[in-house]
Image (spheres, grey):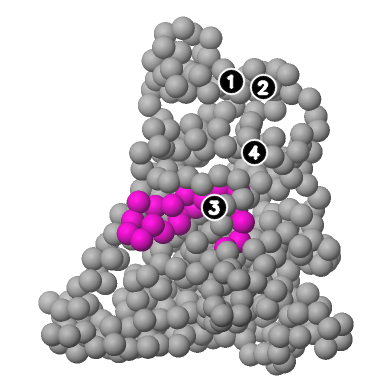
Amino acid sequence: MAEHSMLDCQADNYGQKKIKEFFPRDITPSQLHEDDNVDHENGKSAPRDDYVKDSEYFDKLVDNVDLSYVGGEEEEPAPPHSKSGIPVEKTWDAFMIDEIDIVKCFSSLRKSLPKTNPEVHPPYWGVLDLTGQHKPTKKMFFTKWNELINDFRLDIGWNMVNLDQSEYDLFDNMEDLKAQQTLPVLNAHLTILKSYLEHLKLPINEGELMICFVAPAFRMSLDPNQEKFQKYWSEQQLVASQERRRQEQDPNDERARVGQKTDIIIALPTGPALEGFICEVSGGLPAGCPKKIWTDKLKLMVGMRDMINRVIKTFPGLLPIDYMKVIVFGCQVIGLQMNLYAMDVRTSGIYRFGMIDKVSLPASAKELPAYEAVHTMLRSLEHRLNKLTDYCTDLKVKHVKLRRKRDYIYQEDNLAFSNNSPKTFSQKKRIRS
């Protein structure tokens, strides 16, 4: 009973706060060397001004990337250790590992970003890159890197689902007629893929890789009956990004803004339809150049961050712990390699981004049985998107129950993003009793 009373007290206290308190640790203009929206040295628009207006913003950052800041990703993630000797404080207001204040370290990292093209660095957007690819991030947290990774993986809780025995039988003996007849749709997909691989001629461009490899895999192995989720293909706009870009827009002076263009989007069957997954294909075969791969990954990070922020804006006024459990997913396809990532919001203005799985598409007809790894990963992703749908539904119900309080005040929160975290301008309207 005491525990429930404490939770009720926390909910009452928190209900008086505005959603802006989720994002208080914003970097100031002087810290980012941005006095306004103009770069006085060369007369160009500042990154923030370009970003909110240009749906192809990240595609145009390729020439700004300095590869000296970009290394290689960590090896394929290992299962997290359930127990660790390093204490980790898990509250919204504190992000501590063995008395090391991660929030302060991350703030210092953001302040240290170079004046030239800071927008090509994940910390600029509030993203804590735990893939190890952004060298300044790994250097800043080097002494607690393993603890950060382990804590992230424990919170994400990624696990593979088991396939049906009939699916294992088909991958073990793909020429077996009985196995083919048991799973005719999956067998048809594999037959088409085999035919394409037998006549594959390199190089192929990004569009052909998307049409012949990536899209069929997501169509077949994730919600194959197309009953659970809405899938959008080939450079569709991300609604979460669109809503953010439209903030502070003068409709009388400017054209309507669209969200960032994304290769694959999976929307959840919620009301409103929230996005839970996005995918970027970085070039064809061979894969794109390193700078293109990095900007696509950065685009993925910011898109996933916007997806989390949209959930927070859609269901405001809940406890911070409710938002900390929102986990969205993204995939980057580099050549035939598929990297699967997850993201959550750990505390104000810090979005953790890390790899949770990595598989490769078959490179030849002889490698076709290796498609089992892709199939299993996407089935596991489907399972997690189902859980995310259920969780967002729970958030909606919790949000509705806030109206039961006598002092309930309806809040419309317009999130205007500066460079990485939103500032909130709240308009209150009392609900008529």
The stretch in magenta equals 259-279
**Residue that numbered label 3 is attached to:** 278
Instruction: Measure the C-alpha gap from mark 4 to mark 2.
Output: 13 Å
Question: Looking at the rendered structure, which numbered label has been put on residue 192?
Answer: 1
Whether label 4 touches label 2, CB < 8 Å: no
Mark 1 is on which residue type? Answer: Ile
* Label 2 – label 1 distance at C-alpha: 6 Å
Q: Circle 2 is placed at which residue position?
A: 196
Residue 265 within the segment the image draws in magenta: yes
- Within 10 Å of the Cα at label 1, are there few (<14), some (14-19), or many (20+) other Cα atoms? few
Secondary structure beneath disc 2? helix
Q: Residue at x 13, y 85 (%)?
A: 433
Q: Residue at x 50, y 64 (%)?
A: 240
Marks 3 and 2, Cα distance to the nearest angstrom? 25 Å
CA separation, marks 4 and 3? 14 Å
Which one is nearer the viewer's eye here, 98 or 273? 273
Is residue 241 toward the left or the right of residue 398 in the image? right
Looking at numbered disc 3 in the image, what kind of residue is underneath it? Ile
Instruction: For mark 4, give the secondary structure.
Output: helix
Where is residue 370 shown, x and y percent of the image? Answer: 59, 27
Of pointers 4 and 3, the one earlier in the residue sequence: 4
Q: Tag 3: Cα neighbours inside 10 Å, few (<14), some, or many (≥20)?
A: many
Viewport quadrant of the N terminus: bottom left
Mark with earlier residue (4, 1): 1
